[in-house]
Image (spheres, grey):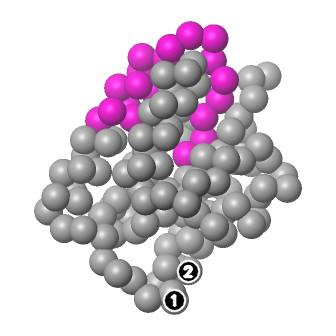
Amino acid sequence: MNKSIIITNNPLVKNRLEEKVFLEYYNVDYLKLLEIVRDKIHLGYKLLTHPLSGSVKPNETPYKTVIVSENSTLDTESLMIIENSIVTTKKLLDIKNTPPWNEEILKDFQVIDLSLIERVLYKL
């Protein structure tokens, strides 16, 4: 089985899952996280989760978690998905930046992101 990696900017995901799975945490915004995922795909990784999954838009939440796995070649489908996700995120951010949420709302967004990834993680 290929090694899966969780790539996240969500501190709650990091705290809850870092002892259980291989995880890379980055203290970056949503868009930069997608760019990091794109770089992984160029290195031969494949998307296991969609970068725009969930009902919260990229300009509403600062947090995102994506799962990738090692792949022997460049996965063009993953590359197209991540590139389109980056374009979509940039369009949404051009319309309206992510609000400066208070800590309580940020915690809620962290929980939403964690719950989305946990549902998928245990099915892999």
In which quarter of the view is residue 69 placed? top right
Q: Determine if residue 94 is in view.
A: yes
Q: Is residue 43 left or right of residue 97?
A: right
Q: Is residue 81 magenta?
A: yes
Q: Report, in whole angstroms, how far the alpha carbon at label 1 lies from the one at label 2.
A: 5 Å
Near mark 2 (Cα within 10 A), the count class, few <14, some 14-19 or many ≥20, is some
Q: Amino acid at mark 2?
A: Lys
Q: Residue furthest top?
A: 73
Q: Is residue 63 left or right of residue 21?
A: left
- Describe the element under mark 1 as helix, strand or loop: helix
Residue 62 in the image, given as x and y percentages of width and height: 43, 66
- Describe the element under mark 2 as helix, strand or loop: helix
- Residue at numbered disc 2: 107
Magenta part of the chain: 66-84
Residue 71 in the image, given as x and y percentages of width and height: 63, 18
Q: Amino acid at mark 1?
A: Glu
Q: Residue furthest front?
A: 27
- Residue at numbered disc 1: 104
Q: Determine if residue 54 is in view.
A: no
